[in-house]
Amino acid sequence: MSLDTLANVKTRLGISTSADDSLLGLLQDSADAWVAGYCERDFAGGTFTEYHPGATAFLFLRNYPVTGVTSVKADAGYGFGASTLVPATAYVLHTERGVIQSLAGAFLPVPAPAVAPWGYGPRNVEVVYATATSAVPADVKEAYALLVGHWYRHVKTQIASGFQDVIQQTFGDTTSIFSKDQLAGLPVPDEVRRLLAPYRAPAI
């Protein structure tokens, strides 16, 4: 699911014709993947299944805000059958930040020397949860449209320059000057990164 509709992206970019709809649709696919990778989150929402280490009392979900948790299962054998279900009364969900906190210590305590807890029991806690759909923040949609527009201008500039690495062309009395950045297609505009900065997953 795209972060925004083609119609909304075109409105934000001031594009009023349908001549380049196919191109814009392809660029939306690329922008969806870029934003998800940059922020390490899926803003489109839905149901997700994730696996976390068990030797800790905190599970940091990739996507948030969380609308509900279907199940938390802890299993050192990685089977995740019905008997491994962690009762909802044994943990607290911090919905806005997507954190599940155990009320009884580590989800799967592991006797081990004093090293980082995520070094034990990799992927032995399974979490199924959901986030809201159709709830992409407005500033994320703006960054998304700006990114699509940046790549769109790159393609149009390349077409206008005949796919040649030139920064200026003169035909008769008309001179066209092309931006080096638009010819190269890089970098991603700082405004895109600035708008997405509050939504990036923190590095741990």
Image (cartoon, grey):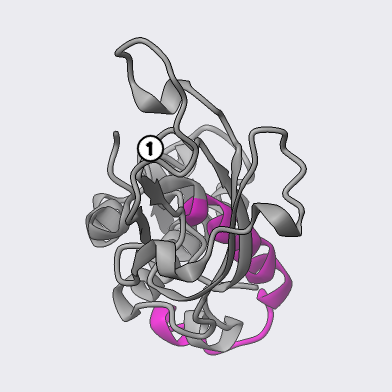
Magenta stretch holds residue 166: no
Q: Position of residue 63 (x, y in %)?
A: 46, 61
What amino acid is at disc 1?
Answer: Thr
Above or below, 139 against 15 in this view is above
Q: Position of residue 152 (x, y in %)?
A: 53, 61
Residue 89, image quadrant: bottom left
Magenta stretch mostly in which secondary structure? Answer: helix
Above or below, 119 against 195 in this view is above
Can the viewer see residue 34 in this picture? yes
Q: Secondary structure at mark 1?
A: loop
Residue at image point 44% right, 83% down? 135
Residue at image point 42% right, 28% down? 118
Magenta region: 11-36
Side of 171 where 29 appears, left or right: right
Above or below, 146 against 134 in this view is above
Side of 190 where 45 appears, left or right: right
Say which residue label 1 marks.
56
